Amino acid sequence: MTHELKAIVFDVFGTVVDWRGSIAADLGAWGARHGLVRDWAALADDWRARYQPQMERVRSGAIGWTVLDALHRQALDELLPLHGLQQLGEEERRYINRVWHRLNPWSDVREGLWRLKQRHVIGTLSNGNVALLVNMAKQAGLPWDVVFSAESFQAYKPLPETYLGAARMLDLAPDELMLCAAHNDDLAAARAQGLRTAFVARPTEYGPHQRKDLAPAQAWDVVAADFIELADRLGA
Amino acid sequence: MTHELKAIVFDVFGTVVDWRGSIAADLGAWGARHGLVRDWAALADDWRARYQPQMERVRSGAIGWTVLDALHRQALDELLPLHGLQQLGEEERRYINRVWHRLNPWSDVREGLWRLKQRHVIGTLSNGNVALLVNMAKQAGLPWDVVFSAESFQAYKPLPETYLGAARMLDLAPDELMLCAAHNDDLAAARAQGLRTAFVARPTEYGPHQRKDLAPAQAWDVVAADFIELADRLGA
């Protein structure tokens, strides 16, 4: 028997916010103020390329639990010399690292979330840490009812505990909860734990030459062009 | 050196919501529909009287981690025969137990929180479980930026891990975080961990004959009559 849908949790990086465009714009403006001209989108790409390997070290147990802000900072310290920025001091590095707290949503997100919020509990289910997600929501106007983070479970997606932990903390059966994501692998892991799934393509998440996640890889429960269509499809 | 205040977390039962009045009204209406006339405020008092002893069993390690919904249900099953309600079945008991998800805020709360939210991160720091707090916020219109629960830390207030855990998850120093509560003992425990403190008296939380927490027991950082005065005092 299928239960009624009660809550929707959202992947954040790429699905809700445009991390690559936001980082390029934020650091581009910061660089201009400091006389630093760099390819900030390329720096964003290099930064993001370290994301999965870093989390895999945590998931595998090679290192203990480490929040994403700290992983981002380790990667940044490695990257800066490769972009001719090794001269930056502690205060500047802290500012740059917090760019992940200042990411902007895709243009359909706020309207879609406000509509979905009228009918459902809406929340994050992100590998970002709680402070990052709360600061981002505050700045970007994202009206979450609840913020679930890998930090809440000390486990990074796609480990099962993240999806099941969100359902458990909401006191819901897995199929009363939906994951919305722009990434087929995240949805596959959620479906394997019994969650419902919604795919929203974000074909420029990785820039103009993106090759992956351009289309749904499985018959997800909902496939929508954006959060407004998602609200339409869910009757919100 | 004192840091700037960044975030305010709120005790919920008694401080934000009127649990006694809400339970009496909610179950009074439910009882009327079912032809059951009882002293529902007395039932609420009996229920709440079991709260600290139950949590103490968890805090002491006598029993393992147990969420408040489950503690409430155990207490309810003990109480019902004392109120001539032993005939109630599973569905009715579940409805009654969820009354804690349906509590109403004091009249100043929504306006005060919306004002405070403009300048600060606002959240819960409650012994209620996450589902209880999220459902309550949804129904009552409480605009939390973040929901911290004893469940988030698997520790009940006043254990230090709850106050320090909220600061850590927000990536704040303890004195960048304030606890607002109507209970002097909660504030004393928060202050012992370095948090700022705000006392708001709720002199009818326990009904017309309340004896405790009628006035601040220490020189808390802020003492306000209600959440609107708290917003005034914090410049929000």
Image: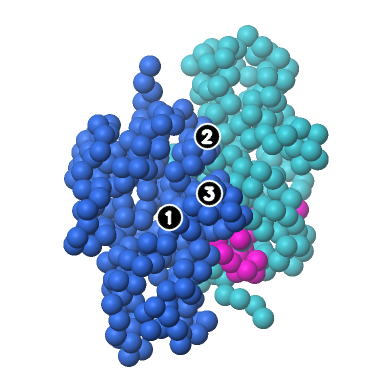
Chain colours: A cyan, B blue
Would you say the residues marked 3 and 2 are in contact, meaning their CB atoms lie under 8 Å apart? no
Chain assignment, label 1: B
Would you say the residues marked 1 and 3 are in contact, meaning their CB atoms lie under 8 Å apart? no
The residue shown at (80%, 34%) is A62
Classed neighbour count for the residue bearing mark 3: other residues with Cα under 10 Å, few (<14), some (14–19), many (≥20): some
Residue B33 in the image: above or below residue B103: below
Is residue A185 in the magenta section?
Answer: yes
Foreground pick, B132 / B181? B181
Q: Mark 1: which secondary structure? A: helix
Range of magenta residues: A168-186
Question: Which comes before the other along the chain, label 1 or label 3?
Answer: 1
Chain assignment, label 2: B
The numbered dot on residue B52 is: 1
Q: Mark 3: which secondary structure? A: helix
Foreground pick, A226 / B197? B197
Q: Mark 3 and mark 2: span between their CA atoms?
A: 21 Å
Q: Amino acid at mark 2?
A: Arg
Foreground pick, B5 / A17? B5
Q: Mark 2: which secondary structure? A: helix
Q: Amino acid at mark 1?
A: Gln
Q: Quadrant of residue A56?
A: top right
The numbered dot on residue B168 is: 2
Q: Quadrant of residue A150?
A: top right
- Residue B82 in view: yes
**Residue B207 pos. (x, y %):** 23, 62
Would you say the residues marked 2 and 1 are in contact, meaning their CB atoms lie under 8 Å apart? no
The residue shown at (32%, 58%) is B17
Is residue B182 in the magenta section?
Answer: no
Foreground pick, B175 / A167? B175
**Residue B66 pos. (x, y %):** 57, 58
